[in-house]
Image: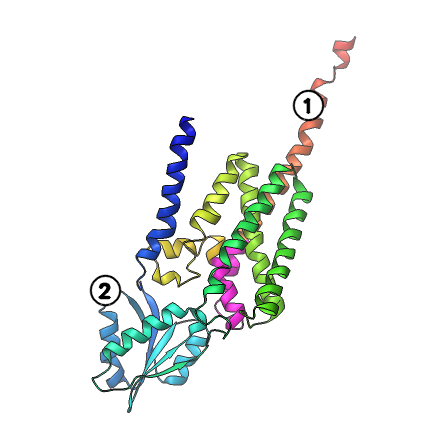
Amino acid sequence: MLVVLVMVPVVIALALWAFAWPNARIAPHDLPVGVAGPAAAAEPLRQELEQRDEAFDVHRYDDESAARDAIENRHVYGAVVVTPQGPKLLTASAAGPVVAQLLTDAVSRQAPPGTQLQTDDVEAAPEADPRGSVLGSSALPLALAGVAAGSLVTLLGLRGVRAATALVGAAALVGLAAAAIADSWLGVLTGNWWAEAGALGLMALAAGASVAGFAALLGRAGLGVGGLLVVLLGNPWSGVTSAPELLPEPVGAIGQLLPPGAGGTLLRSVAFFDGSGAGTAIVTLSTWTVFGLLVVTLAGLRGRKTPAAREQHAAPSPASVS
């Protein structure tokens, strides 16, 4: 009774802190943006952005074409181009509608009075999901799918190759089903269908394998550790609904090291940017996947050896029989 009375409020408080605190402190923290145009005109703007309490990580580009390339390659979220007619803002709402709106507001306040701010959405969010709300809501179901797969593998006593096969097979089916819903049906993803299915499946596999791996190491307590990292911390710290650079430090960076955050970044890259900027996310998800699959496989090998060792230990020696 005491455990219930103490643990339930603690878990609820932790969940409220993990979910509510980052959303209550959304603000840019070293948000990558670009400034393009002639040096004499662009340098004052660059200095002004850099002086905003480390809100922006400003990159300098020679012209609008270079700034567009940087946005399409996911090096920056947007760029301000200095033109004779006034500032021109390049955004990419597909990388995060919240960021695009934040940049629009910030540059509009800096524009000279009476100047009409030109805007160009280089990579627009799909018409079926202009605010990114559907994409943002996909992180939690995939995290839950991974936790469910890892938990079932553990509770059913699967180990070794059987456990690894179950985790990989479940993740593959999750990826196919999620791509069918998000791309084919809802139209909120607009990239290569198979790449999207692979990204969604890898996200689910990384979550499931990590949960099963922790359970193989720690027993059933590992299910709680895996669920804590994937759902309670990984989901609200993923930055999928906004951007990692808008979350309080170091929450955004930590979130990108967990399956939901890395999965969200990978999904945006393959769905809207032809895979640009996906390298780090793939490494992160692959690391969690290899860790989990390796641990459950080794646990299965150890489990098979243990009964044989016990039988050999229990068998009487020839000397004792004589």
Direction from residue 83 to residue 97 in the image, left or right: right
- Please state which of the two labelled residues, at mark 2 or mark 1, is closer to the viewer: 2
Q: Is residue 262 above or below residue 9?
A: below
Residue pictured at 65% horizontal, 46% vertical: 164
Q: Which structural element holds mark 2?
A: loop
Measured as percent of width and height from the top left, residue 39 is found at 27, 84
Measured as percent of width and height from the top left, residue 182 is found at 57, 65
Q: Quadrant of the N terminus?
A: top left
Q: Is residue 312 above or below residue 73?
A: above
Q: Residue furthest left?
A: 113
Q: Residue furthest right?
A: 322
Please give the range of residues in magenta: 262-286
Q: Is residue 291 visible?
A: no
Q: Which residue is mark 1?
A: 310
The circle drawn on residue 53 is 2
Q: Is residue 162 visible?
A: yes
Q: Quadrant of the C terminus?
A: top right
Dominant SS type (magenta):
helix
Q: Residue furthest bottom?
A: 84
Residue pictured at 48% horizontal, 58% vertical: 262
Measured as percent of width and height from the top left, residue 258 is found at 46, 52
Separation of residues labelled 2 and 1 (CA atoms)? 65 Å
Disc 2 residue type (three-letter): Asp
The circle drawn on residue 180 is none
Residue pictured at 48% horizontal, 61% vertical: 264
Residue situated in front as seen by the camera: 288 or 180: 180
